[in-house]
Image (tube, coloured by chain):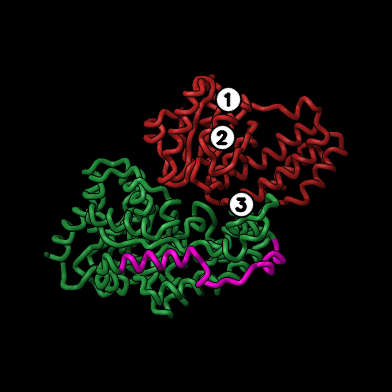
Amino acid sequence: MSQLNKREITKNILEHKGTDYIPVMLNAVTFSAAQYGYSMMDIFASPEKWAECVMGTREKLGFDGLCCGNYVLVPAMIAGHMENSGGVASGNGEDTIHCLEDIEKLKPYDPDQCMNLQGVLKTLEIMRREQPDEPAYVIILNPASIALNMMGGKNAFKSMITNPNLFITLANTVEDRVFSGAQKLIDAGVDYLWSPMPNFSGYCISRKSYEKCCWESNKRFNKRIHDAGAKLVIHTCGKYDDRLDLVEQEYGDGWHISDTVTANIAEKYGDKVAIMGNIPCSSVLMEGTPEEVYRIAYQDCLDAGKNGGFILSGDCDMSPLTPLENIRQVVQAARAAEKVLYKK
Amino acid sequence: MTKEEFLKKLSDCVVDMEEDSVVNIVKEYIQAGYDPQEGMLDGLVDGMKRASVLFDEEEYYIPELLVCADAMNNGIEEFRKYLPEAKKDDNQGRIVLAVVQGDTHDIGKDLVKIMLETYGYRVVDVGRDVSSEKIVAAAIEENADMIALSALMTTTMQEMKKVIELAEKKGIRKQVKIIIGGAPVSQNFSNSIGADGYSSSAIGAVRLVETLLKTT
């Protein structure tokens, strides 16, 4: 490994400066909790437990990077008091916005009072203290994803056809609130924010709906993150091949890809963004043999790691049922590929 | 307008997502003296089947399909006023549908529900993030022919095995088929947990249900 520590290496990758190390960063929070016998509720409620299981699992299996938490509960803070479609106070803010008038009932948001955000910051603090050289990232929902959540998935999808103005107005309204929390994470020194968009892929909505309802908001919010000096990895979860030209303009420093061919993405976009991925979490990482995992992981490295801008990962969240040996094979594949790619 | 022209118009209302004007077309159809069940099946349901083909062909996506379903359901609600009581409960089979515990992704389930109802199955939707106990209890209470389970995360799909085990424990496994679906689920996984079948798509689920319930 080079003289740089892993945080510096990750920064170089996301800034397209090239490196001779392929970090292996697995979305492994649920997996890690299962390793320690914790439920997700257990670790959401306790930064100490979250940090314990994520750091411990990473260290034991030899992969890189630490997920500090999910910054996703803005809807609960601003709309938890509002009724959902069932006529009861939602508590979590989901399915509460059904018309423009509902937007006027949203509460202000104070990130310093948000327990979700404070918990994530606490977890980051613990991780910096215990494993200071590991890159630390936070999962963040962008305003369009928040809007979908707050309208309820079904109603939000329908509104993209029948009333796109409602969806767009809601995403615009929550943007400042979401960004205020993101700013706290940036100020605390998170290495990157990781933004998943599974509901806007080609499994769910057309390119036309994406462009009309999500794209402007994504560009604007992500640019604010970029201008604040932070790094952003966009998780293109699902089928995105037909709209990557739009995603290209969304200020992502890296793309965590899925449902696509790594070599194609690397060839077309590898000089513009860092690539992360792309081992199928279910069919390969969880169900595959160790040999199959190694082969696919190794090939991903060769396909995307030539210019030193690649982070090896699964294509999404790793199942708690993933065999430990398969994870070890991923790490071994990265180390072996480095020797070939960078003549180490 | 002839009956065929009306049926085409009803079908087009669904495909074209005319969720409001479909009701007026239904009223005109009834006033013209034509059979309501035929209007439902050969008009509205035909339109939904056309919409599902467009979905398979990636011309329509989830938003379009949901609005088509609204148009179909608005029309069906109007037709039901004119159906004889006995016809209102006609169905090909009774299916309990659920997203397993810990998982709140329900759009896929909703699409499957739309498709199954389109093809004449009675669907009891018990919702999302549903415990195995509640799913099996619903199947017993509804005298279901089948349980259909959905999971969208690798972290929740293991709950499907619990449903199957509980169904065995409660003594209903032989009478009730269990099928599964969802992005991380596979045929291999289905085989490994002892499910009766797996489908990767909503329309595929209909074909699977047709096959399994025909053989019982």
Question: Are marks 2 and 1 in one subunit?
Answer: yes
Residue A102, placed above or below residue A318: below
Q: Badge 1 local density, few (<14 within 10 Å), some, or many (20+)?
A: many
Q: From the image, tell me which residue sits under label 1.
A: B145
Amino acid type at image mark 1:
Asp
Amino acid type at image mark 3:
Lys
Which chain contains the residue that carries disc 2? Answer: B
Residue A25, placed above or below residue B198: below
Which chain contains the residue that carries disc 3? Answer: A
In the figure, the shade used to draw chain A is green
Q: Quadrant of residue A11?
A: bottom left
Secondary structure, mark 3, is helix
Query: Principal SS element in the magenta part?
Result: helix
Q: What is the number of the mark on residue A154?
A: 3
Residue B3 percent coordinates (x, y): 79, 36
> Which chain did the renderer colour red?
B
Residue B143, placed above or below residue A238: above
